[in-house]
Structures are given as structure tokens and as C-alpha cells.
Amino acid sequence: MKHLISPLDLSVSELKEILDLAGEIINEPKKYANSCNGKKLATLFYEPSTRTRLSFEAAMLNLGGSVLGFSSADSSSAAKGESVADTIRVISSYADICAMRHPKEGAPLVASTYSSIPVINAGDGGHNHPTQTLTDLLTIRTLKGRLNNLTVGFCGDLKFGRTVHSLINAMVRYENINFVLISPDELKIPTYLREEVLDANQIPFKEVKVLEDVMPELDLLYMTRVQKERFFNEEDYIRLKDSFILDSKKMEYAKSDMLVLHPLPRVNEISTEVDDDPRAVYFKQAEYGVYVRMALIMKLLEVKAC
């Protein structure tokens, strides 16, 4: 049985299969409307989510399946102390596939070892968010036409940002990728990512503190919010939360075909004035998240268009 816990659980060829299928779904959604008739998706969300949870639900409904689950730990038996292992054993009797978000790193991996249905990691702490990575890759490939020969800037919270960690892990497998890491010292990428992923794969990267200085170099700018829920100290959060704000003035430094991505939700790290810039594609990115999750569900359930 196949699970998706890390972006690296999928080979480059498997990624291509999923992205190709997502592209077909975009072009012919009606062809796939009954692919999951009679199938159930369980959404086990132990922490809040809007886009990820609802896009999973929309994906399964678009495929003709149904959805059950919970949207917070407080509304599940976790509030009574039930373990992830016991929960997934029970859910395996109710559903055909499961999407799990959990604040503790590794929880979906634990669930997968006890599950008799495919488990999809929908985000675990500051660790991984593989379906957001699939969404990002589909957005980049569709709008840039390639996943190689790119200079990618990551800006904001690179320490706790699981979407950043996942996308870096995925993109190092493509040719001629360069990273520009833009953050304050306190929010730099973790040491393990620098040493075990970037250095180990000899990926060119540089770390800077001023966004404007590197804007002209970038093919993609991936913005992130400074996440209050990842901080132990509120003073540190308040001091750093406005460190990098993208506005129209900064966009003047960018290439005419640079794309701005953001996993959302946005707080104030991208000014709303940027929304009307054709290079701002974060809402289109959220739309693509439904299509790529449809493709992933189909692959893990081994179903075809019908």
C-alpha cells in the first residue's frame, strides 16, 4: 500500500504522472467526475486548516466520492486522550483513504504504520506538507512551463515553514535549480536542510536579508507568513512578523515574468495591492491544489477515469 508522508515518497517519474493527470483533470474535469464513486475520504485535522482541508474535500467530491472526518482535535476523541494509532485503526474501518494534519512532526508517519488504508500527510508541525508541494509544482510547471532551470527565492519564515522545507526537498531533484533564501537570522532554514539537502546535493544557494537586492534574479518568489503558532515567545513573534512585506514598489525590481507564490493564509506579508499584478498567482495556486489532490487520490486508490 502506498502512503504519502514526505515529498520524497514519490519518485520524479511518479511526480510527473500525478502532475500529468492533474493537467488532464484541469482540461477535462467531467471525465473524472465518477472515478471515486462509492469511495470515502477521512479528513483527520488535529489543527486548523481552510485551504488544505476544504481542497481535499472538494477533490473527493469532484471525483464522485464522499467525505467524513473532523476539523480540530477538540472535536475528536483525541480530546479524551486517544492515540493516533488507535484513531487510524478505527478510521481504517470507515474510509478508503485518509488525509491527516497534526501539530506533531511524525504523527502521520506513525498513523501509516498502523493503517490499513493509504495515509496522506496534510501537514505535520514544521516538518512536511507534501500535497502543498504537489500544488506548488503543478503551479510552477503549468505557468512557467518547466521545473528546471529556475532561480527560486524563498522569503519570510524559512525555519518553521513546512511548505518551504517540502518544496526545497522536491526541487533539488530537478536540473539547474538555484535557491535564494531571504530571511532574518532567527528564521533561517534549519541546519539539517542546509547540510543534508542543499550541501549534500551541491545545490547553489545564498542567504540574504534584503528582498529588493535579489528580486531581479528571481524566476519565482515564494512568500511565507511568519507563523505565530510556531513561536514559543510572543515578543520574538512581534519583533519579526513584519520583517518582509512584498508591495508594488518591490515588484518593480522583478522580472516581467517572475511569479509570486504563497501557500496561504496571508496575513500582511503581501500587500493587497500586489493581488492585481498578473505575476501574483497565489489564488490560482490554491485552485490548482484541488486538481492535484484529485490526481493524488486517484493514484493512491488506483482508480481510473470512468
Image (tube, grey):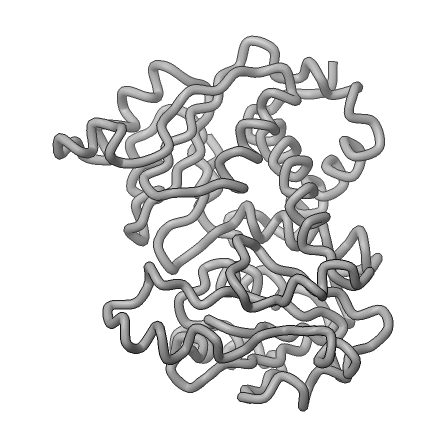
Q: How many numbered dots are placed on residues in this image?
A: 0
Q: Is residue 72 above or below residue 105?
A: above
What residue is at 68 percent from the left and 49 percent from the top?
283
Residue 279 screen position, x and y as percent: 79, 63
For this view, does 215 lie left or right of residue 208?
right
What residue is at 41 percent from the left and 72 percent from the top?
159
Quadrant in which residue 259 is drawn? bottom right
For this view, does 7 lie left or right of residue 281?
left
Residue 247 screen position, x and y as percent: 67, 73
Residue 215 screen position, x and y as percent: 71, 82
Q: Is residue 101 above or below residue 44?
A: below
Q: Residue furthest front?
A: 273
Q: Is residue 70 above or below residue 155?
A: above
Q: Residue furthest left?
A: 81
What residue is at 33 percent from the left and 29 percent from the top?
115
Q: Is residue 252 above or below residue 143?
A: below
Please tell me which residue lies in front, 15 or 68. 68
